[in-house]
Amino acid sequence: MARSILERRLVDVSERLKRLRVELGVTEEQLAFLQDEAEDARLRALMAETPLADAEARDAHRHAEALGRHRDALVLSIAELGREQDSLLDRMAAELSAN
């Protein structure tokens, strides 16, 4: 693969990694908030013992779980891009040492 193509792909992967890491940071902050809200809703439901409070607690828990799955997907994407970046760097290093 031509060096310029490798460089462009490396820049692209690097930019995508930066965006995903920023998104992961925001998602983790939001997740912490939603988990706290879900726990508060669960405690309110225990105290209130009403169907409405139970429904609110379940809803808050589902939202926190969904955001947790999103965070997990971001972590996997970041890991995959990291491996791709390493591979591209290895290929560039191999090409440079061959020249």
Image: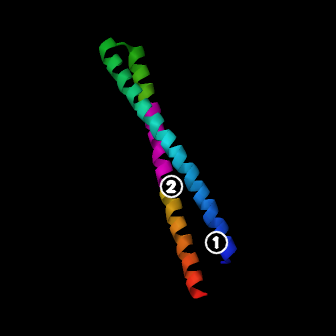
Tell me the residue at 47%/32% (across/down): 63
Tell me the residue at 58%/76% (across/down): 92
Which amino acid type corresponds to the residue marked 1 in the rendered image?
A: Leu
Question: In terms of depth relative to the viewer, which is nearer, 60 or 84?
Answer: 84
Tell me the residue at 49%/43% (across/down): 25
Does residue 69 appear to the left or right of 97 in the view shown? left
Residue 15 is situated, as x and y percent measured from the top left of the image, at 61, 56
Residue with the mark numbered 2: 78
Residue 70 visible to the viewer? no
Residue 12 visible to the viewer? yes
Q: Earlier in the sequence, mark 1 or mark 2?
A: 1
Residue 3, located in which quarter of the rendered image? Answer: bottom right
Q: Split into 4 quadrants, where in the image is the N terminus? A: bottom right
Instruction: Specify the principal SS of the magenta part.
Output: helix
Establish if 36 lies above or below 88: above
Specify the label residue 6 is tagged with. Answer: 1
Tell me the residue at 54%/65% (across/down): 85
Q: Which residues are magenta?
A: 62-76
Question: In terms of depth relative to the viewer, which is nearer, 6 or 53?
Answer: 6
